[in-house]
Image (cartoon, coloured by chain):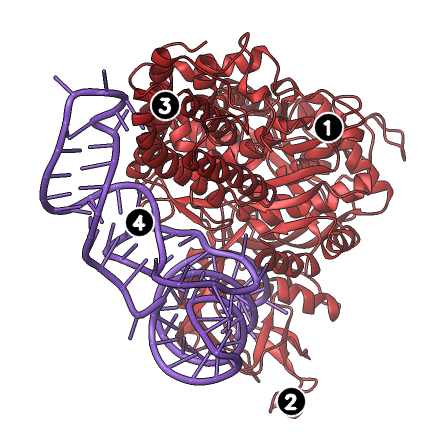
Amino acid sequence: MAGELEKNFEPKGVEEKIYSLWEKENVFTPKIDKKKKPFTIILPLPNANDPMHMGHGMFVIEDILTRYHIMKGDPTLWLPGADHAGIETQFVFEKKLAKEGKSRFDFDRETLFEKLKEFVEENRLTNKDQLKRLGFALDWSRYHYSMEPEIVERVLETFMKLHKDGLIYRGERVVHYCTKCGTSFSDLEVLYEEREDKLYYLDYGPIIIATTRPETIFADVAVAINPKHKKIKELKGAEAIIPLINKKIPVIQDELVDLEFGTGALKITPGHDAVDFEIGSKHRLKTISVVDRSGKMVNVPEKYLGLKVLKAREETIKDLKAAGKLVKEEPLKHSVGTCYRCGTVIEPMVFPQWFVKTKPLAEPAIKAVKNGETKIFPQKRFEKMYFDWMENIKDWNISRQIVWGPRIPAWYCLDCNDSIRINFLNKKKEVVSGPYKEIKQSYSFEEIKSGLQSLFSTGDATYQLKDGSCQKCGGPNVIQETDTFDTWFLSGQWPVNTLKANPGDLEYFYPTSVLDTLWDILFFWAGRMMMVGLYLTGKVPFRVIHLHARVVDKFGKKMSKSKGNVIDPLVMVNQYGADALRLALVLGVGPASDVSLSDEKVRGMRNFTNKLWNIGRFIIMSSKEQGFQRFEPGMPGLEEVDRAIIESLNKLVKQTTKMLDNYRFGQASEELFQFIWHEFADVYIEQSKQRIKSGDKTVLAVLFHVYSVCLKLLHPFMPFITEAVWQKMFAKNNSLLIKESWPS
RNA sequence: GGACGAUUAGCUCAGUUGGUUAGAGCGCGUCAUUGACAUUGACGAGGCCACAGGUUCGAGUCCUGUAUCGUCCACCA
């Protein structure tokens, strides 16, 4: 039965062959059996546009679970997909455009969208092939892409449902805006950086205020002091005076003002600061904007008009100094919000955006974890984080001013809302901007619509959720919102929408069993899926959230292109084989910790694959001479050492099973490694050599038995080599190891 | 400002309810070897488990505090 084995295991070429064997027999496509409980994982969808990096390698955890459950006989589904990744992709694409000397403003939005679509299509399939290289047992017949029409359709349905339930609203609130990327962000997408800035003390007449942003004084609408301020009596009812423009503004009281900071007085600028906005709305103050979406000054004295924010700051300080209104300046260390994508300082701005009311969605999501419907591993650390976040959640800004993504399905009648600002390319390919009531004087609706880039509607604009003529005035000049959905709005409903794509799947496979991910997107993704999944189905999207380790370099440092310490998973696969890389990523690794990866470690694991291979080779060679006998638990001729190794093996089976059930992959793989190399190979096999020479057939039976069980136990971790050996030594009629049942 | 995590061999890290001489991979030293494997084997060096207290018959493991590093959250104007 046994074929020859080469001297060393050569993964190249073999891996592809083995993978196609699995694909040919459809082992990754589950058979739905209503009597059996399914096991389901949804792959954290990689960006369609990204080649694979080591982070994707950690999906090996999901592959281990998947293969383990396939072998246990559970109908097992691991569903793959790809994400259009709105902002990420558009950012990369715009960089490419810049190299060609172009920008997004050179195109109307429809053309830009088509170009982006083509761009992604070129890359979309590469990481699909890369996932296969790692051996992942994904059901490719259920592969989905977040921009495919059926998925988008369901996303729009979800929006409609939320809207109907009163959970969607357009609101004018402070949003985080990146003037370079040209879009707003949710709270999660802002990175706070510690910066060394200056705090300027300015003379506001009866009071002195402290600010880091003197250029925004023109947008001040009040000065607020804490009610416990020691000068409260003399300041009651007083008016402060904005320097340079000598504008009078009221002095108000609010507890939000910190007595200790600066002078205990805060200039209130609702247009450009979130706290100020909150105080402003409490006191019914108006909002003035002095920075526009390109980061230039507006609504300010002429000499500052059109200046960039930082330049305007310089000029203002200069003028304040000259006017004797700059009392003093001191250094200040504080954190500044920056764009997570391009690093530009985030400009808090007030304009209408689409929001999801999150409180009603968060409540069930909190409850589900509290009562254990969804468990988080490791529990102690991350449940606390989860609750902190869910309990303090703010409404979710789901609109992005980018092109790459599904457009929000709302339509405005331009005649009913003629102050909507429009940017479009006219027939001469020139950018024209202005309120509709002005530009309609010179351009037809058709020309505007076909060259449309973006529109900025006012907070009180009326909208309808259907295309066609205006439901109010009956007019034909109706145009769709140009904002697109936040990518996470799509991925937040990914498990539901992908399972809905195949009839019967949602009912059978949902709730899914495990969500496995890195903790960095716990809130972005897992949290949103919890909220939206519960909202859409009434059931949690997954029973377990397992947080895997982060891959770092051999010095424990985060891998990054700028540090040049990135290890390409495919380079490792080519050099040492997928199995070696896989084992290097899990062996001895704790959950949600760091796993340090190095060439040396992968090489060490490659040595183990070779050891495993040569055990097989040894057994084959030995049995060639002596023949082979099937192992039976009570067979005659068993010696003490045989009984000992069998007992040890049985213990290993129990241990491995228990550890896989408890997500202890690091320890499970470590014990397998120890047993196989240092107990089975180093001790038992060494001892067996004498007996084989003397014609002992029992020892061969034991060798075959122990080895075959080890291959099964190891298969989820190292699928290629175990399947390859199985084919040579144990397969009857080419039956696959993955189809063997899990030992017990 | 709040919270959390880490600190174990030269390096990178395991060590689930406290229980005999604390483990792995890589690295290092000595020796061995043309019949499974040099991608090997045997043997070995190397650790007051960050520090200081406490609980216990017994602490790497539990409690308190300190230090250093790291992470997350926050409305530091």
Q: Which label is found at residue A499?
A: 1
Mark 1–mark 2 Cα distance, whole angstroms, equals 62 Å
**Does label 2 or label 3 sit earlier along the sequence?**
2
**Does label 4 or label 1 sit earlier along the sequence?**
1
- In the image, what residue occupies the spot 66% across and 92% down? A233
Other-residue count near label 4 (Cα within 10 Å), few / some / many at <14 / 14–19 / ≥20: few
Q: Colour of chain A?
A: red
Q: Which amino acid is tagged 3?
A: Trp
Q: Quadrant of residue A393?
A: bottom right
Mark 4–mark 2 Cα distance, whole angstroms, equals 57 Å
Q: Mark 1 falls within which chain? A: A
Q: Which label is found at residue A232?
A: 2
Picture quarter with the C terminus of chain A:
top right
Q: Nearer the viewer, mark 3 or mark 1?
A: 3
Residue A714 in the image, given as x and y percentages of width and height: 48, 31
Q: Mark 4 falls within which chain? A: A
Mark 4–mark 1 Cα distance, whole angstroms, equals 41 Å
Circles 3 and 1, Cβ within 8 Å, touching? The answer is: no
Mark 2–mark 3 Cα distance, whole angstroms, equals 83 Å
Q: Colour of chain B?
A: purple
Q: Nearer the viewer, mark 2 or mark 3?
A: 3
